[in-house]
Amino acid sequence: MPRQEALTVRQSQTESKQELYNFKNKRVSVMNKLMPVLLFLCASVSVLTTIGIVITLITETYQFFQKIPIFDFLFGTKWSPLIPPKSFGVLPLLSGTLMITFIACLVAIPIGLASAIYLSEYAPKKVRKVIKPILEVLAGVPTIVYGYFALSLITPLIQKVFDSAGVFNALSAGIVVGIMIIPMVCSLSEDAMSAVPRSLRDGAYALGATRLEVALRIVVPAAFSGIVASAVLAFSRAIGETMIVTVAAGSTPNMTVNPLDSIQTMTAYIVQVSLGDTPHGTVEYGSIFAVGMTLFVITFLLNILAQFIARKFREEY
Amino acid sequence: MEALININKLNLFYGAFHALKDVTLTIPEKAITAFIGPSGCGKSTLLRTLNRMNDMIPGTRIEGGLSIGGTEIYSNEVDVETLRKKVGMVFQQPNPFPKSIYDNIAYGPRLHGITSKKELDEIVETSLKSAVLWDEVKDHLKRSAFGLSGGQQQRLCIARALAVNPNILLMDEATSALDPISTLKIEELVQELKDRYTIVMVTHNMHQAARVSNQTVFFLNGEVIEYSDTEKLFSNPADQRTEDYISGRFG
């Protein structure tokens, strides 16, 4: 009898042990299987959108080039898609876009870089704490606001200096696009410079370098790949900028090097056609896809170039 | 040995923290002086006052006298960059610039206006020779300094400091990140350099101080407890706290 009892005790012990070491939990295992699927779906939204956009661009552009020879499009110097005699040479739009971008970079890269150097090398902590958020606010201003800022403030100023400047001109829009991308250049370059280790600066200071020498000859070279990346990003942002140029640069496709003239950029042309009553399926309608494709290819190549430059000039620390 | 650096009742504050208290000390010329003491005792802080690297830390305040060769270095007329050119520094972690070996050494001379290729070549060679690194790197001066081993990098940093022709060399625990063999090489190098330079080194390693230095200064809680000839300090310390520290009772 005592033996029997002992046996049951042992049995119940084994049972409770099994229970104790029961690692199965249905709820958790279902969650574990479901979560990756859900997350993957979220991630694929943006991927699928990109694929969709590229496919649309390619098919519409292909149809456009069935009607207009690609050579005429790429090398034609007259852009007149809406008013006969119709002509689809993209160079005036391209030159307008590049002029805006060039002016914008001329404004943004020196000022952005100088502010980044100030913030990372000179500014006391307190000043940096105030300026950085302000810069980020500047980056959040809607571009339409910048557009009217160009039109109602910068353009009159330019007209005071240059009599020949029109109400719509590339200079005003370019300057304001530049102002718009300053925060981007500044913020990204500053991040890159702040990431340069303190010890490198100490090493240079200990050799008798001044703050400026440390900034220009140690920090900037060490952060160069980040700085180039910021500049190229800013460049592609300027190329793609739409609202400011639509409002302030005019809508005259114009092969000119005079920044005081009215011009039209690729983006502004796309806006013009999409807002008008151009019927679907026409050549004019197709032209915005061809222009969009051109824009896409340029930005794409720029990004590759940026990566190449960044890799080539990388100074590792 | 003649005193080169005179420190007189020096007090240093980081904000409200009193990091150096009434430090009075003389450092002899063309000899090796070692600063020892437990972590946070102020030895590195004092070292960094000698080339005014503490200026960089906001909220630092200094009172008292600190003269090098008779010049008060904290007076307004002193040009910090010229001072740092004359008082070189080597750090705890080797910190070569992300440039070639050649450009690392040439950085300082270029900074101070030397542009002639011939002159720079000469400086690079003599500096690397002084730092006993020349034979190891002479065939690939254009390679990145990051390809060197830790010990080589530290000797490169010494060469870089020597390239601007300083009189004083400060070494802030310059061997603590290195393996024993590299450490030994640097110690031998320092021995060679003391004929030409005044060397002040901070070290965590008492044995290193005993092996290498001519004079040793013992710090505790921001005060100089005792300083004297290394031999005397280690064999016959005047203060009980020094005795306790060097015999390993704390720290």
Image (tube, rainbow, N blue to C red):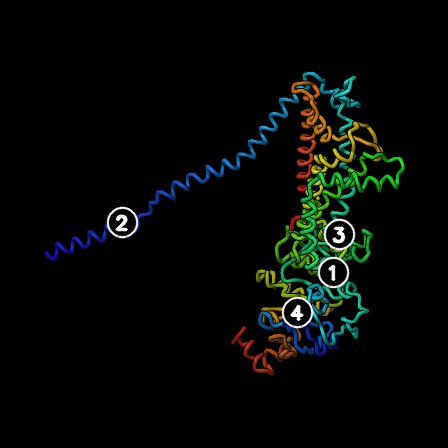
Q: Is residue B214 above or below residue B132?
A: below
Left or right placement of residue A29 versus residue B10 in this view = left
Question: SS of the residue at dot 1?
Answer: loop
Q: Are marks 4 and 3 on the same chain?
A: no
Q: CA distance from mark 3 to mark 2?
A: 69 Å
Q: CA distance from mark 4 to mark 3?
A: 30 Å
Q: Quadrant of residue A256?
A: top right
A99 on left or right of A127 = right
Q: Which residue is mark 4?
A: B15
Residue A228 vs A252, above or below: the answer is below
Q: Chain of mark 3?
A: A
**Mark 4 secondary-structure assignment:** loop
Task: Identify the amino acid type marked 2.
Answer: Gln
Instruction: Give how far across and how far down residue B10 sits, in percent.
Output: 70, 76
Give the class, few, some or many, for how many residues have Cα within 10 Å of label 3's Cα (few <14, many ≥20). few
Front one among A224 and A155? A155
At label 1, counting other C-alpha atoms closer than 10 Å, the crowd grade (few under 14, some 14-19, many 20 or more) is many
Q: Which mark is residue A18?
A: 2
Which image quadrant for residue B81? bottom right
Residue linked to disc 1: A207
Q: Give me the chain letter of mark 2.
A: A
User: To which residue does mark 3 refer?
Assistant: A216
Residue A235 seen in this snapshot: yes
